[in-house]
Amino acid sequence: MIDPQVLERHGLKPDEYERIVSLMGREPNLTELGIFSVMWSEHCSYKSSRVHLKTLPTEGPQVLQGPGENAGAIDIGDGLTAVFKIESHNHPSFIEPYQGAATGVGGIIRDIFTMGARPIALMNSLRFGSLDESATRRILEGVVAGIAGYGNSIGIPTIGGEIAFEPAYSGNPLVNVFCLGTAKASDIIKGVASGVGNAVYYVGAKTGRDGIHGATMASAEFDDKSAEKRPAVQVGDPFMEKLLLEACLEVMQTDALIGIQDMGAAGLTCSTTEMGSRGGAGIEIDVSLVPQRESGMTPYETMLSESQERMLLVVKKGREHEVEQVFEKWDLHAVHIGDVTSDGFLRVKNRGEVVAEIPNRALTDEAPVYRRPMEKPAYLAQVRVLDLNLLGPAPKSEDALLRLLASPAIASKRWVYRQYDHMVRTNTVNLPGLGAGVVRIKGTDRALAMSVDGNGRYCYLDPYRGAMLAVAEAARNVACTGARPLAATNCLNFGNPERPAIMWQFAKAVEGIGAACRALDVPITGGNVSLYNETDGNPIYPTPVIGVVGMLDHADRVLSRRFQTAGDAVILLGVGHGELGGSEYLKVVHDQVLGEPPALDLKAERALQDLLVALADAQLIQSAHDCSDGGVAVALAECCFDSAGIGADVELEGVNVAQTDQVNIAAALFGESATRVVVSTAEAGVPKVLAMASACGVPARRIGRTGGEVLRIGVAGRTAVEMSLKEAERMWASALERYFVRRVA
Amino acid sequence: MKFAVIVFPGSNCDHDAYYAASHVLGQDAELIWHKETDLKAADAVILPGGFAHGDYLRTGAMARFSPIMREVQAFAARGGPVLGICNGFQVMLEAGLLPGAMLRNRSLKFLCQQVHVRVEQTDTPFTSACRRGQVLTIPVAHGEGNYFADPELLARLEKNHQIVFRYTSAEGELSEESNPNGSVAAIAGICNQTRNVVGLMPHPERACESILGSADGLIIFESVMQFVKSGALVGGAQSA
């Protein structure tokens, strides 16, 4: 009965099946095959990525929990810990945007409270195709509404994120969601099953047929049949999750728990196997005891269902009643479905009869690991070449700046984030759109800053450097609030790893992340890999998304991008080299994705970030804003926006990267050289700021002052941009919304 | 004084209201589970924001069946000050503590942003420290805050001076743009005829500290503190 068609439906290769037979010492039955197929799927086993991920730095005195648990954890002082992770829900969000995104949020929240932490902040990183396509607008509206619908209901603020638009994501949008929680460090609880005879409990929503093979779906490419996979997308119930969250946190206060794990990808299968495996024990359950929402479900379906809002708990023998009572308070019913055993097997019974019996090791440690072939992609030779002298006619600098400010990637995302409750829990001290998200920690003076960043275009042009730049930007954004970057989480979105070119991109990106994380001392504490992001053979841009978390010792010293006072001095930290490769300017104005992404000197980056933290702590600067998409010109405009109309008059140094003045001016204004931050300070503070910069080895120059209703930028002594701030801000503020104004026929 | 903050299973601003009352204002405050039947000698009751029972039916529709609501109703009937914030306001409408109904926002989207509300009445326990016409900057965060009253009810609310807060510009002017959700007559909050029950969509508990962007919401809580201290409530509402 297990023939090649059955194997193909399960996403298993013939040699993988042979490995199963040899590990089992017999042919598996269909239930067992199903269990192997999800546990050995790319999504659960990391079989293609594991050898590369091992090279990432994961340790440091600040790390309390590295990769391998439900989420990472770091020390934030006073015996407290911050628990955080980022995860993708790309495939489900393409098939059913609202529920795909909503359940992505639900999943990452469960990962955080499963660790014993109360979730206090959400962020997201989204990628879509061009907004000119109606399909993209529909997907974006659905994704945003799904994120809002789940996060708002459960009462966790969505405090920021990023959105980018590239045709490469048209058939494969990316939805990466980040969650952070806090806990007493001593309260951290793990996903482990141990102690023979301890009870295994199931709690939460009933199990249905939804999401069967979701993990396998996420491990395959899309084609025109993908819409038929809609039943593999789950439906979220944020109210149920709210009950689970509160009840689980309450149960964790009793010390009656051994371990707990949410049922995410691969549901009951993954949670029982992983908990047993981590604890060096076995788990035996009877699926007939599992609460079911549909009748006639087979053990196969019950084990593979990905119904949402379910948790698996291991409870100390004799303490069951206590645990049950807490769940009863929240009108949840915890059901005893099995026990911990000593034999290291996952044993599944149905009304007492064994229907699957597999050694945990076979499903986890013995899962295949591939060192897949890699090859530098052929396209690179063409796209890396950029001759700035062949760019063709360009608009005036003012017009180019306005076009950039109105491009969806740069334009204000207010239309999106005002759909998210970003203030609930009354901790949000930096609102969305002002830089990294910042939440204070009640009961302390401190605050946590967090930023998620990635640049698919840079990574397409150079995955190694692009990934380094993503780490640097996320950490820089955190440092711009005055927070010291502490640790990182990553979400690696790539195409089909069975293609050597994609695998090369992946390996290079991981190398880049490792190098940058080491240099900036932000170890990776966990994350997620999403492969097979392709539709009809067209891969997405390689898109590693990095979330960095940092800490401010004084929440009230937090900085945002906005100029605060007219008459302050504007200082540029770092130096621009007019690097236009892979820039937003090239894309928006010249419709080109070419060249090399900006160079990155990690030592200089570290020095800049250290300086920012010191300047903020000494309360020497009023604002800080990183120069990224659109270069220093866009950064300056953004410093003026939302500032109640404080303009600026600045003078930039020229660059010499092309034959014509026009291109050189554009490069000075819109080049995206890394490691640059615009800060403002009271005039009297200028000497101190410059002295501290010099002591840190950071190039710094006073480039002008704030004030007036105009943004004027001179380049090499000549005025390049002079525009009404009001007009520029109106363009920037309304650009995104204009795509969604209901078109009346 | 003592605040009681009612906790429905889907409340999510319960801790925010509790924090404002206890930590910012330094008053006694207690979270009271919806299955309880005792308000624990509170001087004022807050129905907080959130999604009381998931609100998949209508916002606040099921909360009135929670056991504690009988006590809240009785407390209100005795003249005790009760404040409904956001979902708490929606619960009040469903429970008949206040008249009218909520529709989805005009934009059909959830909306979280700072708004300006003008204080229209200063003779309620929650606005007694305000000046009439004072403009407060307080955030809203809701998907269904589009308050609806038919012309008859609207006329009655006007006549009885039951419209307590209206959405306005920063200068206190009424305008289409400053009404975030399409509420009839720009209504942001109302009170009952005896004035002790006040419901509003904006979140004063989110605007109690300048680090959060505004401390304008404090005056709502300070008002009720003054009200309770002054013994305005003759005989006390606590004891039945």
Image (cartoon, rainbow, N blue to C red):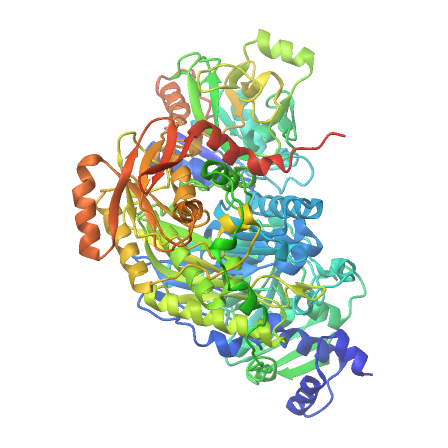
Q: Residue furthest top?
A: B159
Q: Where residue A446 appears, x then y in whole percent?
A: 31, 48
Q: How many marks?
A: 0
Q: Where residue A394 appears, x then y in whole percent?
A: 51, 44
Q: Where residue B123 appears, x then y in whole percent?
A: 45, 12
The quarter of the displayed image where residue B170 is located: top left
Between A680 and A339, the residue placed more toward the observer is: A680
For the N terminus of chain A, the image quarter is bottom right
**Residue A356 appears left or right of B75:** right
Between A346 and A674, the residue placed more toward the observer is: A674
For the C terminus of chain A, the image quarter is top right
Whether residue B182 is situated above or below residue B112 in the rendered picture: above
| Residue drawn at 61 percent across, 70 percent down | A43
| Residue drawn at 32 percent across, 37 percent down | A650
Q: Residue furthest front?
A: A659
The quarter of the displayed image where residue A357 is located: bottom right
Whether residue A338 is situated above or below residue A425 in the rendered picture: below
